[in-house]
Amino acid sequence: MPETVQDQLQAHIENFADLPAEAIIKSDILRLGLQFDSEVFKVSGDYKPKDYFIFSFDMVPLADQEKDIVFKAPEEIRISGGRYNLKPTVVSVRINHDSPYIVKVADGEPHLFIADQNLGKLDFHGVPSFYGETLSSGHKISEIVPVLEWGYLLYITAFRLCQYWGESEECRFCDINENYRQQHKAKRPYTGVKDPKVIVEALKHVAASDTTAKAYTLTGGSITSTLKGMNEVDFYAQYIEAIENEFPDRWISKAVVQAFPLDDCRRLAKAGLKIYHPNYEVWDPELFKVICPGKEATIGRENWIKRVCDSVDVFGPAKVIPNFVGGVEMCQPYGFKEVDRAIESTREGLEFFMQRGVLPRFTTWCPEPIANLGAQESPPLEYFCKLLLAWRECFNNSGLPMPEGYGPIGVGKAVFSVSAFMDVIQE
Ligand code: SF4
């Protein structure tokens, strides 16, 4: 077993030679988070800081972050060059004061180090031209329509809470409700329910000056009763209708909502929704029940799976894209302890869905301390390397088209920043 963190990284790059080094390093940064030397912020020019658009995606609560870091870290980094001669690779930022990955200044510019080894030069994404403008409601556009994925994706969190509430209902990996509370405690403007008219006004500014964004994701917590007098389908459909009426097909429309019966899916498609994300989270039947207790109680695993598969008839092959939280099946005390058993389980889910025209993808689980699962060790890097290989093999065997709404494909081009699944696709 290699002793230092840099030796361990090197060993994985050698042992998983079928994967690009970029994808392995990206997965490792995502699973372990990043430290920042605050000197970096003095040399990085203007950049877009983390918007905390829905979850915290941090391994340290805001209250415990060092004063010269909090709200200063960039949303994403792009690393290139270094000892592995990396092609530009975009990675989402997750603060972790104990991470072996440290952003600090070298030659007057931000660089990424693992321990004392320089892994390459960093860019931070600039501030979009429309970002600072204030809307007639008084909101900043960055609060209403933040951008992610190096500007490719507009992220619209219409409802920043979830009606799955407390330990017996919330998904155990999810800190949406607690993040809302911590943002308010930190006195940040953080709108709970966004007005469709305000979103459309913000998008008018985006449309007037931006050519980088190609997709939007409409998202928010689940609605199990009603919100503003509407059920979940009507609540989220009103935003899609408002956006698509004003800007028909201007961006690829995507929505993260629950798994609905066919009539409700037709309602969303009629509103203008193209890509449907009924996130499935974790495949193993027992783990689904424990990790997603609210979803299990209101819809149920079997029903969720059936609805996901049925919805392909409405949206079409590869346009139903449920997310797996990659690695949460190894969470403790509930999950698998052996990497190969975890991979075997998740691969079964990937194959099952892909054989039915559904195209699951995964994000890299961030063990947020304020989520129910709490702070804990991430699964080992070996797990994420094997998951990338499993996903790519299932995808290559599926005959499905490339994922739509995720931007460019392949190493050096991908912009999807919370897992490396887009980086490993071979063109
Ligand atoms: S459904 Fe689960 S993952 Fe989604 S916002 Fe609610 S608690 Fe979080």
Image (tube, helix red, strand yellow):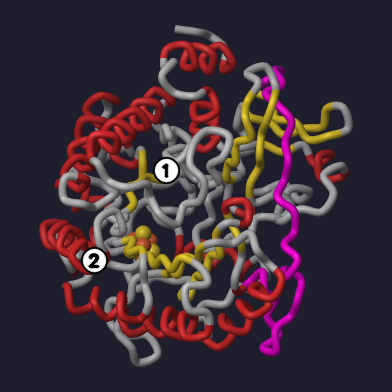
| Quarter occupied by residue 10 | top right
Q: Say which quadrant the N terminus sits in.
A: top left
Which comes before the other along the chain, label 2 or label 1? 2
Left/right of residue 347 with respect to residue 188 in the rendered view:
left
The secondary structure that dominates the magenta segment is loop
Q: Secondary structure at mark 2?
A: loop
Q: Report the side of 43 relative to 9 (left or right).
A: right
Residue for badge 1 = 365
Stretch of the chain drawn in magenta: 115-143
Q: Residue 421: x percent and y percent?
A: 42, 39
Residue at the spot 17% in from the left edge and 73% down from the top edge: 262
Amino acid residing under circle 2: Ala
Q: Name the residue located 52 percent from the left edge and 72 percent from the top edge.
A: 250
Foreground disc of the pair 2, 1: 2
The disc placed on residue 259 is: 2
Q: Residue at x 49, y 33 (%)?
A: 27
